[in-house]
Image: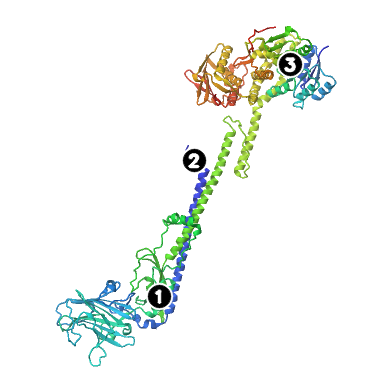
Amino acid sequence: MSKRIAIVEDEAAIRENYADVLRTQGYQVQTYENRETATAAFSLRLPHLVILDIGLEQEYDGGFTLCQWLRGLSKTLPIIFLTARDNDFDTVSGLRMGADDYLTKDISLPHLSARIAALFRRQDALDLPTQQEHLLVSGPLSIDSQRMTIAWQQQTVDLTVTEFWMVFALAKHPGHVKNRQQLMQDSKIYVDDSTITSHIKRIRKKFMRIDAEFDCIETVYGMGYRWNDPKHTGPEED
Amino acid sequence: MPFRFGLRGKLFLLSTFLFSIPWFGYQYVWEMEKYLRYGQEQTLVGTARALATTLHDRPNLFNSHASFLPSVEKGRDLYGYQLKNPIRLDGQYRDWPNFTSRAHEYGADHLLYRDAKSTTADALTMDFKTTLGKYDKYLYLFFNITDDKVVYRAKNMINIDRNDHLELAFVDETGKFSRYLVSNKKPGWLDTYRITDLENGIPVVTPQIQGQWLDTPQGYNIELRVPLSMVGDKIAFAVHDVDQEQGKVLNTVGSADPRFAKTLGTVLVPSPEIERIVRSMRYTNSSIWVVDQHHRVLATAGDIRQAAGVWHKKSAGSDSNSWWRNLEQKWLIPLYYMVLTRPPSDFIDQLYDASNLTGKHIVGALQGAATSQWRLTQDQQAVILSAAYPIFINNQVQGAVIVEETTNGIRTLRNRALEKLFSSILAIMLLGAVAFFLFASRISSRIRTLRNQAEQAIDEHGRIKQALPLSTTNDEIGDLSRSFTTAVNRLSQYNHYLENMSSRLSHELRTPIAVVRTSLENLSMQTMPDMASAYIDRAQSGITRLNLILTNMSEATRIEQMLHTTEKIEFDFSQLLKGCVQGYQQIYPKVGFTINDGEPLKGLNFLGSPEHIAQLLDKVVANAVEFTRDSKVELAVREEKSQLILTISNNGELLPEQMQERLFDSMVSVRSSKKQEQPHLGLGLYIARLICEFHQGKISASNHHDPDGVTVTISLPLGAKS
């Protein structure tokens, strides 16, 4: 059964471009141009994934409202914000409301479809038993690359897809400095330096919610970031 | 800064016009004094007139005297001074006031008889000085006779005229003519004889005429008194000089020929009747004189020293205000009397001879016109006002009343008025000046506050730093302040619009770019002719560049937003610097970096946001690398006055002069267009400035020479150095 993807976007050209790409990749795509039509459709039947714009016609925060409403209906429905707004405040708000990812419209179509695929993969993987070959364990950190989940001291760290890729890229090679450019490539986003900085900050906070002592992500000023193992254990690769 | 004539100074200068008030007050009081003087003059003339009125047409007051004579002759017509003290009949003139000045000298001019045979010598061997006075009921006479040979009457000598003797002749009030001789046998009590109306030719001893004969080295003195009842207003006396024992009279010198009634001279003694009338006027506090037409004083009353003209009561000192009295007495009054003069209570006025008054006003009055005059006393201490009014008898001026007063009373009044005026004006001026000063200070401080607020509201880059507080004062300055506030608010809104321009532009452009890019991507997935794919690639590279521009544009905005929420932490600055430089070495392998950090900065803890400091370094170093000509970038860090000074220098192109200030503004770039391989919006150094300002620091760029290049100086305050 092909996945159903809903796109809520008021700009017809973009909406149709995204829809076309996703349809060629075999997804069923429904498009909605405002919150009312989307709400009406979603109350009948939920899609497998929703791509939301924040500003919808007259509603400046229509996407956020819709996201909250959707999260109320389903805890697991993958939601991606795809918007032109790239400021920190909106990013944080979007992710707080339970979106799985927050993308700006700079993203290229292949990247977008890769993220969608990844989200579906994670969604599907959650239903499957954990396979050891996808598991990367290093001290208190365990990364399930298939389910795209990260656990610290056996507790799941609630990361978005972008954040997951960043941590994954860092932790895969502990002790190696990854500069911002590399991190961008690894996490398949194109943003400016300060966005990377704020992403790293958010990741640190999420880890520190579990372990106040967490200091594995080190800032190497002028270069980038580096994952330092808390215990001296050899790096494992999958 | 040169002296500035501010609002306060101007108002203060204006307030000095207050000082003209005392001048006006002074003029006013002067004017008032003039009127007071005029009033006093009128009063004085009135007094004189009143007195003269009581004396008009009362000829009996003048009858008994020589007042009706058409002229008086000095020496023949005599004046009896009113004596104030009794005279002791001792032959000495010590108890006669002003004897030397009042006595009249009789000599050759007054020779009545000369024995032609015996006097071969021309020189007169005898002369004398005489003065007359009246005391109580007696007329006193004093003769100071100079004689080379004093001849007394011999013992048992019946003749009384064969020696030095004095002859007196009077016409008494009843008109009876009598002659008397004073002929002594020895110095001592006088022997006086009447030689008229004799029954059998024997002179009659006259004990009513009493006196003393006193020998002196020059001659002799005779002091005697005659009851006024014996003396009318006609008198003559003569001294007969005899130089031989029982000899003949050689010379006779006298006031008038005493032998006949009609040849006698006159005597004027101050009239008791007039004096009584005048004395009744003494309560006017004036000095009063009555003179006859020959300027001779008939009566006087009052003393000019007491005649202040005004009844000034002693001001009842209000002791309740004792501190004020103290202040007034100690400070104010002495201050005022540097300008004012106190009317003298002790002055000398001897313009008038007590027997004879002169002056234009008297002359005028005796010609029938009431006149008054002002004059200074002889010692120039006081001003005396005199009024003279004629006395008419049968339409003839027979005398004048002269009333005199000093202006001391008015001057005292004037002084008191001026004291009060000065005191109140001083108070008004002080209060006024203080009020003016406070008012001016308030206004200028408000204007200065407004100026400071206006200056602080906008920084040197023209950006609004803070809004002006809204003034609630309802006046012009308040209006100005409110206009400023409105202007600044509008400017602030406009600035805000401009500042958000790039972020809004980037936001607005992002959607159409996304449309184009997604369309291009979709297109590239289609099978296309080879030619078309080239165009698609070009379009895509263009879109990518546009995207880069947008990303740069939003970066500055995002940094601003992020800085708002960033918390400062403590970190090792030199560690960060070294780490960054290592990183730059990897990124720019062709460029040589050198750090020159001072010893004391090792392990320096700095409070701030390390990520942003690193970003600041990224931007500045990227700039330096871009402009370096010899592939060298020097970094130096030092501590100076609790400021961390970081300099980043490169050798190469100099900055244009006018750009040094604006270099760190948004959208400013000095790159030459040929270097523009990548889009550049001049946001890098703007972001650097934002980060510096977040750390309360400053960033500036300056040229250095030899070799030419640019140094960027970043100074950050080391507020929380641990």
Give the answer, above or below, for where B267 lies relative to A127: below
The amino acid beneath tag 3 is: Thr
Indicate the position of residue B198 as horizontal and vertical percent values: 25, 91
Q: Secondary structure at mark 2?
A: loop
As drawn, the label of residue B401 is: 1
Q: Are marks 2 and 3 on the same chain?
A: yes
Mark 2 surroundings within 10 Å by alpha-carbon count, few (fewer than 14), some (14 through 19), many (20 or more): few
Q: Secondary structure at mark 3?
A: helix
Identify the image quadrant of residue B620. top right
Indicate the position of residue B617 as horizontal and vertical percent values: 57, 19
List the residue tagged with mark 3: B518
Q: Are the residues flagged by discs 1 and 3 in contact, CB closer than 8 Å?
A: no
Distance (Cα) linking label 1 and label 2: 71 Å
The amino acid beneath tag 1 is: Val
Mark 3 surroundings within 10 Å by alpha-carbon count, few (fewer than 14), some (14 through 19), many (20 or more): many
Residue that lies at the very extreme toward the right in this rendered image: A44
Q: Secondary structure at mark 1?
A: strand
Distance (Cα) linking label 1 and label 3: 134 Å
Total marks placed: 3
Q: Are the residues flagged by discs 1 and 2 in contact, CB closer than 8 Å?
A: no
Q: Earlier in the sequence, mark 1 or mark 3?
A: 1
Q: Tell me which residue sits at (62%, 43%) in the image.
A: B473
Q: Are the residues flagged by discs 2 and 3 in contact, CB closer than 8 Å?
A: no
Residue B498 in the figure: left or right of residue B205: right
List the residue tagged with mark 2: B4
Q: Nearer the viewer, mark 2 or mark 3?
A: 2
> Which chain does the numbered disc 2 sit on?
B
Distance (Cα) linking label 2 and label 3: 68 Å
Identify the image quadrant of residue B282. bottom left
